[in-house]
């Protein structure tokens, strides 16, 4: 995936979801929950699962979709 799709989602200031080729999905409620690695080839996503804070490292090559939450579109 081209990083511009992720950058646009971050700049929209709306919640979005990143989907991967492995079938995983990561909800990003706010831009503070996602960043790029130094070379901008990997996404670093902070999320919560079972009451614990987790971090996912998602190579852009494995990201298949960035979906802005439809209930927040146009806000």
Image (cartoon, grey):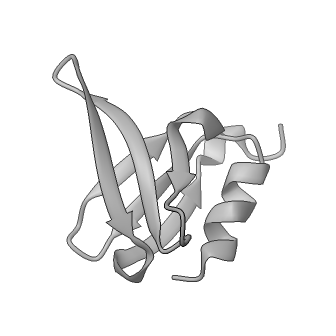
Q: List x then y, in percent, for residue 51.
A: 21, 16
In this rendering, is residue 21 above or below 45? Answer: below
In the picture, measured across the screen, residue 70 lies left or right of residue 13, that is left
Q: Residue at x 30, y 41 (%)?
A: 55
Going 60% across and 40% down the picture, which residue do you hit? Answer: 15
Q: Which one is in front, 63 or 72?
A: 63
Residue 58 lies, in percent from the top left, at 35, 64
Residue at 39% across / 38% down in the picture? 46
Q: If the image is split into quadrants, where does the C terminus sit?
A: top right
Q: For the view shown, which residue lies furthest in the top direction? A: 51
Give the image location of residue 67, x and y in percent. Answer: 55, 60
Would residue 21 be visible to someone looking at this image? Answer: yes
x 68%, y 56%: residue:
9
User: Image height check: is 65 above or below 56?
Assistant: below
Inspect this view and state whether residue 30 appears.
no
11, 66: nearer the viewer? 11
50 or 44: nearer the eye?
44
View extreme (left): residue: 50
Direction right: furthest residue: 74
Q: What percent of the width, then of the height, locates residue 53?
A: 28, 25
User: Residue 61 sits in which quadrant?
Assistant: bottom left
Position of 32 with respect to 11 (left or right) is: left
Residue 18: image quadrant is: bottom left
């Amino acid at each position: 995936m081209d990083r511009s799709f992720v950058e646009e989602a971050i700049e929209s200031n709306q919640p979005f979801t990143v989907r991967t080729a492995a079938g995983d999905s990561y909800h990003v409620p706010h831009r503070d929950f996602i960043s790029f690695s130094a070379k901008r080839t990997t996404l670093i996503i902070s999320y919560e699962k079972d009451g614990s804070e987790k971090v996912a490292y998602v190579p852009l090559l494995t990201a298949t979709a960035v979906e802005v939450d439809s209930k927040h579109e146009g806000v």
